[in-house]
Amino acid sequence: MTSSAHGGGPPDEYVEAEIHRLLTENPEIAEQGITVVRREHSLVLQGEVESPHRRDEILRQVAERFPGIPLTTDIGVIRTQAPTEIEQLP
Amino acid sequence: MVIRIAAVGDVHLDEDVVGRFRPALEQLPGHADVLLLAGDLTRHGTEAEARCVAREFGGLGVPVVTVLGNHDHQCDQVPEVIGVLEEAGMTVLEGTGLVLDTPGGRLGIAGAKGFGGGFAGRCASEFGEPEMKAFVRTTSTIADRLGATLRELDCDTRVALTHYAPVPDTLAGEPLEIYPFLGSYLLGQAIDSADTALAIHGHAHAGSERGTTPGGVRVRNVAHPVIKQAYSIFHLGDHLDAGEVSTAGAGGISQPWS
Ligand SMILES: [Fe+2]
Ligand SMILES: [Fe+2]
């Protein structure tokens, strides 16, 4: 009884929920901070991770699980430089 | 005198991250009296990942004090994880505290992972199904112990260290719908029950840096994706002018950071 934007496939919102859970529950990923944004013709994964390896793995795992869905990623690797400023708290 | 606190949370270490923080960490001696880690040290809480944490954050030349996060509980190896961290010289707090002698005075730190439940007016209540009651009771038990530990610390300056957030201010940027999974006002109430100078937390990767408890305690979210640097440094002390509050760089850094 479900309608679908991708002929025959599940509705987008469920795919989004499934990807979101995959990002957290798949032990190769285990990320809670990645957001999944629906655009007209693709899903965009956004967020920041601790290594380039993790960014590649997210794309690989999601593409493997949802081969029919066009994906775009905009995931950054968080910088780890020493601070240049101190916060003074009297 | 000033107490200098370095802090970061949510470093989520595994083999692929080891070495990334180390160059910045090696600058800590001389710049900080303690390094606080606000939980989520690992990806899945395995003993092997804890060894990565020990390699990256061990032997720094400044005391390292930590709480665990939800990720550090994922593989049910908490005793092994704690064992590895303690072996590397770190202090792991859970409803416990310690007092460090620093040149700026005695620094008391009380720490606990914390848990969710939400914030005043929009929070879960201990009512209904056993699962719901257990959820809320988990948070209230942790918060009660945190409050008692803070009040009992015999020190000049008190700092609270949690993984979950004690206020909603530092969640700004996160979807409102998930606030109840990110923290609880009960932690804030515990922090306000003592004369706390600063509350440090992590967990909210998309949140924001600064907030205040209803009782006026400064709260800082130091999750790595929020601070976007290896750690933040806070100087605590009475000597500073009110005008210097939160003005980055005011008063100056004695040595330039490379
Ligand atoms: Fe985290
Ligand atoms: Fe977390």
Image (cartoon, coloured by chain):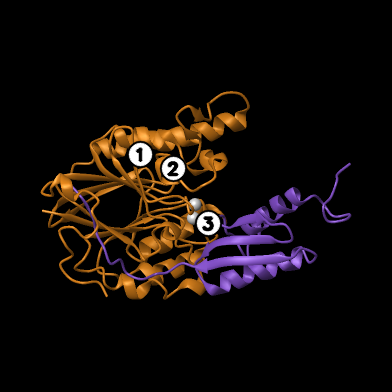
Chain colours: A purple, B orange
Identify the secondary structure beneath mark 2.
Answer: loop
Q: Which mark is nearer the camera, 1 or 3?
A: 1
Q: CA distance from mark 2 to mark 3?
A: 18 Å
Please tell me in which quadrant of the rendered image residue B251 appears: bottom left
Q: Chain of mark 1?
A: B
Disc 2: which residue? B114
Residue name at image x 53 percent, y 40 percent: B176
- Determine whether, in the image, residue B227 is placed left or right of residue B175: left
Between residue B241 and residue B83, name the one nearer to us. Answer: B241
Residue name at image x 45 percent, y 29 percent: B120
Residue A62 drawn at (x, y percent): 70, 64
Residue B157 drawn at (x, y percent): 19, 45
Identify the secondary structure beneath mark 3.
Answer: loop
- Determine whether, in the image, residue B11 is placed left or right of residue A67: left
Q: Earlier in the sequence, mark 2 or mark 3?
A: 3
Q: CA distance from mark 1 to mark 2?
A: 9 Å
Residue type (three-letter) at the residue carrying disc 3:
Gln
